[in-house]
Image (cartoon, grey):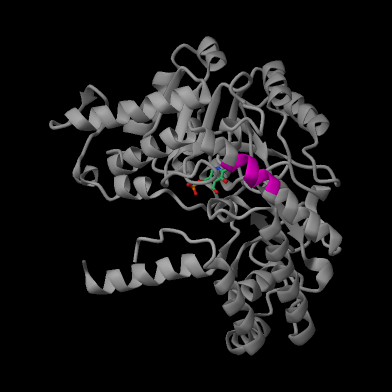
Amino acid sequence: MDKNVNRIIKMETRRQRAELQLIPSENYVSKNVLRALGSVFTNKYAEGYPEKRYYQGNKYADQIEKLAIQRAKILFDTPFANVQANSGSPANLAVLFALLDVGDTIMGMSLSSGGHLTHGHPKVTLSGKFFNSIQYGVSPEGFIDYKVMREMAHQHKPKLIISGGSAYSRTIDFKLIGEIAKEVGAYHMADISHIAGLVVAKTHPSPTPFADIITTTTHKTLRGPRGALILTTDAGTNKDPELASKIDKAIIPGTQGGPHLNNIAGIAVALGEAQSPQFTEYINQVVLNSKALCNVFIKKGYTIISGGTDTHLLLLDVSAKNIDGWAAAWALEYAGVIVNRNIIPFDTKTPFYPSGIRLGSPALTSRGMKEEQMEYVATIIDKTLNYTVRSMDTNFSNNSKGENKEKRAVFLKKLKTDTYLKEIKKEVADFASRFPIYPTIE
Ligand SMILES: Cc1ncc(COP(=O)(O)O)c(C=O)c1O
C-alpha cells in the first residue's frame, strides 16, 4: 500500500472511531460493502446496460448490475430501476434531462425549508438556472404547507413537482403531493435520498404508489456505498410508457459515461442487507434514537424546528443560545462531535453562517447505540455549546451577513488550544470506543 495514502487512511479510520458522527446523511457501511467497493470491478468499463454494452468482457458486469437492479426493484416495489447514477445529484439531473426542456417550470422545496440544491435552488444550481424554478416551503410551525403548495401548483402549472428533502424531519405526505401533481398534469418525482432506509423498513410511508419517479442516494439511511437509484413506478409507466427508457438514456448517453461497477457491486450488497429483518430493527432504533435526542434537547430548552422529528434527523435552532450554526459546529468538532451547520426555515442568516445545526442518528445507531446513549450525546452537545458561549465571544454579527472574518479566525484559534474542549474530546473518545466500528481493520 502507498505509505502516504495508507497513513492518511489509518488516521481517518481512527477519527471515525474516536468521534461521534451525527451528520444525518452519513453512515458506516458493512465490511462486505467495503470489500465490494475495493473489488476488481473498478477496473472494468461497461458503457451501456446489461446485454447492451458498447465494450467487450462484460459477462460478470452484467450479472452484478442485474443483481443490483433486481434487489432495488424488490425493495421499493417498482417495475424499473436504474443503478448507474454516480450519486444523488447526477440522478436528479438525469431525471430533469429525461423529462424536461430547458425553461420548463419545476417545483421543489426551498433549501431553507429543508429541500435540496438539485430541487431547483435558484441561480447557483443547474436545476435553478436552466429551468423556471418555483419553490414551496414550510409554515412557521415547520411543516410543509400543502395548501400553499397546491395553490402554487395551480398558479404556475409545473411540468415536474419534486418531493423530499435534506433537512426536513417530518413525515412527507407523498399521497397528497401525488394528487396535487395529478391535478395540474405534472410528473411527481419523490427524492427519498434521506429516508430510503425508513421507507424500506416501513417507518415512513412509501412514495411508490403516489410518485412517477423515485430517486435516492444509496449512502445515507440505506447504508450502502456512494451512489444512487432511479426508479420508475407503475403510475409513471402508465402515464408515459417510454419513461424507463427515457431515464436509461438520460444517464447514458445523456449525462454519464461508464458506470462505476465496484460501487454497483457495493450497492447490490447493501440492498441485500436492507432486505433483512436486522435492517428493519436497525431503522426502528434509528427513529427511536432521533426522537430520544429531541426529547433531551427539548428538556434543555432548545428550539427544534417543527418541535420534533418523525425520522432520523432533527434541526436545532441554536441562535437563541447566542451562537450561530458555524460556531456551534466548529466548537462541537473540537469536542469530538461531528454535526453540520444548516440553514433553518425563515433564517435571517446565510447558508454559510446559518442559525441551525442538523443532527441525525443513523451512524451512531449503526455503532449499536440506543436511547440511553442518546441522552449522553445530547448532554455532551449541550455542555460544549454552553461552555463555548460562556467562555468565548460568539457574537459575529458586525454586518447583516454576520461574516466578521477576523473575529471568526480568533474564535477558531481559541477552540484549537482550549483545554476544556480537549478534555471533553478525550471523554468522547473513551465513550465511543465502547461502540467499535471495523474492529478488525487497522
Ligand atoms: C434529498 C437529497 N437529494 C440529493 C442529494 C445529493 O446527493 P449527492 O451528494 O450524492 O450528490 C442529497 C444529498 O445530500 C439529498 O439530501
| Residue 148 visible within the image | yes
Question: Considering only vertical position in the picture, is 433 above or below 101?
Answer: below
Is 361 rendered above or below residue 170? Answer: below
> Per the image, is 409 magenta?
no
Q: Give the range drawn in magenta.
A: 282-288
Residue 112 seen by the camera: no
- Specify the quadrant of the image occupied by residue 6: bottom left
- Tell me the chief SS of the magenta region: helix
Examine the structure image and report whether residue 285 is included in the region drawn in magenta. yes
Q: Is residue 307 above or below residue 326?
A: above
Percent across and percent down for residue 5 are 28, 69
Residue positioned most to the left: 56
Where residue 414 appears, x then y in whole percent?
63, 88
Q: Is residue 148 above or below residue 42?
A: above
The percent position of residue 258, horizontal first and vertical second, equals 27, 38
The residue at the point 37 percent across, 50 percent down is 31
In the rendered structure, the answer to whether residue 236 lies left or right of residue 142 reads left
Quadrant containing the C terminus is bottom left
* Residue at 53% in and 19% down: 233
Viewer-proximal residue, 294 or 250? 294
